[in-house]
Amino acid sequence: MRRSILLATLGCVLLASPALAQKRSELGPLCTGEGTPADRQIDACNKIIALKVFSGAKLATVYFWRAVGWNKKGNYSLVISDATESLRLKPGEIAVYNLRGAAYYDKGEYDIAIADFNDALRIGPPSGIVYHNRGNAWRGKGDNEKALADYDSAIRIGPKDAYTYQNRGATKQALGDLDGALADINEAIRINPTQASVYNNRAVIWRAKGDYDRAIADSSEAIRLVRARAPANIMTPPGSVLISAYIQRGLAYEARRDYARAKEDYNATLEGVASDAGSKANQATAKVRLSLLSDAAPPAQQTPPPPTPELKTAPGAAPISAPASTPPPTAGAGTRVALVIGNGAYAHVKALPNPPNDAHAIAKNLRDLGFKVSEGIDLDRAAMQKITREFLLDAAHAQTAVLYFAGHGVQVDGRNFLVPVDMKLQPGINPIETMIDMDTILAALDDQVRTNILIFDACRNNPMAERVASAGPSRGIEAGGLAPPSAPVAGTTLGAGTLIAFATAPGQVALDGEGANSPFSAALSRHIGTPRVEVQQMLTRVRAEVVAATKSRQVPWSNSSLLGEVYLAEK
């Protein structure tokens, strides 16, 4: 997602000092040059600072330009440090607030980024660049309506900026307006047909429409453009466009069941240098999907489809289109898949009577709603790995994926794990090697063209905590509840289009119940099939029923980055 800085507002004031007369031809232009390579720029600014001849506004300018150098290298912490020092020396500079806000955005600290963009807009005059960058931050927070409003403002001020059309199109796509998104992306390409990242955005739209040939063609064009020349935009994290293009093309190949080429692109995704949260998340997804295809490659990959015709766009030409004789593939279009697991017959920790009953009930509900359901009861680790792998492979071809798990769940050093029935804590054995990592599942499902709903009735009380002391490397294990999902900035997952629901709040214990089902699963089973009720509203009803049934001892909790309204029961 591209953002910009304002450079013209901070001039090269350095050349006015007689103390720098003999070095001005070298240090000044190198430090304050937008096109100076990062290391040379930082070195020149360091030397100017070391001379100790500047103070106030002039020294603020040096720190600003050194921050620009750090930004080229993707070192956003040092960008923030230098920009903060620049503002201390000379408050009220729009360009510096914008640069620092952009760095906070790249670190995933969206609220702080928005505060900096607000300050820049408050100082004025109105800037299309700052509106555009604040729109990016709103998008990062998942507030697409506010993002759309800011992109609209940016386009009113600067209607010829291709990047703003690109990001507004991506926002419309997130809101489900695929045709509006395609119109904006096509306009971005018309304005600048050599902009690699915009082809990635259009590839996402084509995949959402189920047109994998066009998606592959656009991703290929993005790769070609990146490799043809170094990115001209100094604010683009190194390698991020290329990493995004490879993951998009890999996902399209996998959706088209061309697994050999998908694996090639996932490997290429992992070769890039990831300096921003989005690239790290893309690499996490590529790593998991590559493992899925390598460990359990479906037979279909033995006879992959023929290569996609290369579809190129010359500068100024109309947007590319697939040949009329090649209809878009429909495999997976509208498909809804689900994995339901209920583990109760634990061999080495407290057995639970209700998870199998809960799983049977939820599986029936989902089948009645038209889902293709894989159901597993009392699974050991090998069986859980197999059924989960098959589900994640199916999800590549689906529009909606639901995962439901009932049983024991634990957190180890803040990461959540689902517990197979044969899990046993033993001295000298790392406990995470005996369980199923929830972060791996999230990374595998991370794809903004699909809706993912993960429901965990998996924090029921158990005696594992009492055994931790003798379990060697498992000192970080917690048996009293699950942790909140990992933050996107950690590189675990972007999580766009995903809802995660827990039977109880983070760190708290869910009840197994006195009847045949747990309080949470009983309420979920009663409400999940309610027609024309949006999924988050449905979970609100479940929460209210569980709180009443448990006399407030259990409060279900959810975390959503859904990109629009989702209905499990539409009729």
Image (tube, rainbow, N blue to C red):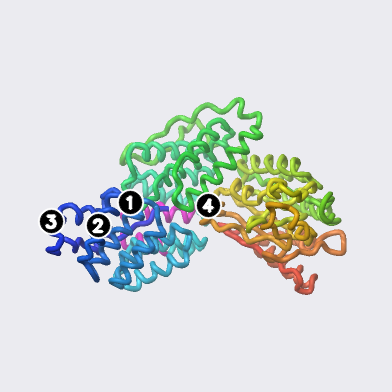
The magenta stretch spans which residues?
Answer: 150-173
Image coordinates of residue 547 in percent, x first then y, are: 75, 71
Q: CA distance from mark 1 to mark 3?
A: 29 Å
**Where is the C terminus found, in terms of image quarters?**
bottom right
Task: Please report whichever mark, 3 or 4, sits nearer to the chain's N-terminal start.
Answer: 3
Q: What label sits on residue 234 in the rendered view?
A: 1
The amino acid beneath tag 1 is Ile
Queried whether the magenta region covers residue 158, the answer comes back as: yes
Image coordinates of residue 565 in percent, x first then y, are: 60, 59
Mark closer to the observer (2, 4): 2
Q: Mark 2 = which residue?
A: 47
Queried whether the magenta region covers residue 226, the answer comes back as: no
The amino acid beneath tag 2 is Lys
Mark 4, secondary structure of its residue: loop
Overall secondary structure of the magenta section? helix
Q: Mark 4 = which residue?
A: 491
Q: CA distance from mark 3 to mark 4?
A: 47 Å
Q: Mark 3 = which residue?
A: 22
Task: Please report whichever mark, 4 or 1, sits nearer to the chain's N-terminal start.
Answer: 1
Give the class, few, some or many, for how many residues have Cα within 10 Å of label 4's Cα (few <14, many ≥20). many
- Asked if labels 4 and 3 touch by Cβ distance under 8 angstroms, the answer is no
Image coordinates of residue 165 in percent, x first then y, are: 39, 54
